[in-house]
Image (cartoon, rainbow, N blue to C red):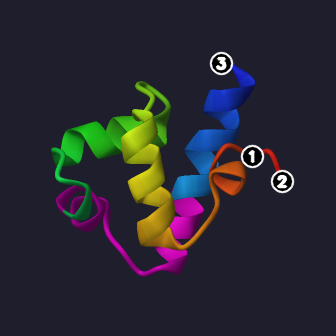
Amino acid sequence: MSNFRQGFTCKPRSARKAANLTQREMAEKLGITCSSYIYYEAGRIQPTLECLAKICQILGVSADFLLGLC
């Protein structure tokens, strides 16, 4: 597993839980299927840059944080 995936998989999950959102609620806010969002958190697929930006906006965190760069 690449460093991107390792950093990305744990950060969105913890930020989502801190925001008291379920995976289904995140998927609805992003306009994607729940399974797609679950795959993001599991590291099976990577979000597009547009989707990454939306995730950051919804969770109120930076992309650096989600990617494990800070």
Figure disc tally: 3
* Numbered disc 2: secondary structure: loop
The front one of 1 and 27 is 27
Q: Position of residue 38 (x, y in %)?
A: 33, 43
Which residues fall within the magenta stretch?
13-28
Q: Position of residue 39 (x, y in %)?
A: 36, 35
Asked if residue 37 lies in the magenta stretch, the reply is no
Identity of the residue furthest to the right in this view: 70
* Numbered disc 3: secondary structure: loop
User: Where is mark 3, residue-wise?
Assistant: 1
* Numbered disc 1: secondary structure: loop
* Side of 69 relative to 18 (left or right): right
Q: Which mark is residue 68?
A: 1
In front: mark 3 or mark 1?
1
Which amino acid, mark 3? Met
Asked if disc 3 and disc 1 are in contact, CB closer than 8 Å, the reply is: no
Asked if disc 2 and disc 1 are in contact, CB closer than 8 Å, the reply is: yes
- Among the 4 quarters of the image, the one containing residue 48: top left
In front: mark 3 or mark 2?
2
Q: Position of residue 42 (x, y in %)?
A: 46, 37
- Among the 4 quarters of the image, the one containing residue 9: top right
User: Where is mark 2, residue-wise?
Assistant: 70
Q: Position of residue 35 (x, y in %)?
A: 22, 40
Q: Earlier in the sequence, mark 3 or mark 1?
A: 3
Q: Residues within 10 Å of mark 1 (few under 14, many from 20)?
A: some
Disc 2/disc 1 C-alpha distance (Å):
6 Å
Disc 3/disc 2 C-alpha distance (Å):
19 Å
Question: In percent of the image, x 24 and y 55: which residue is there?
Answer: 27
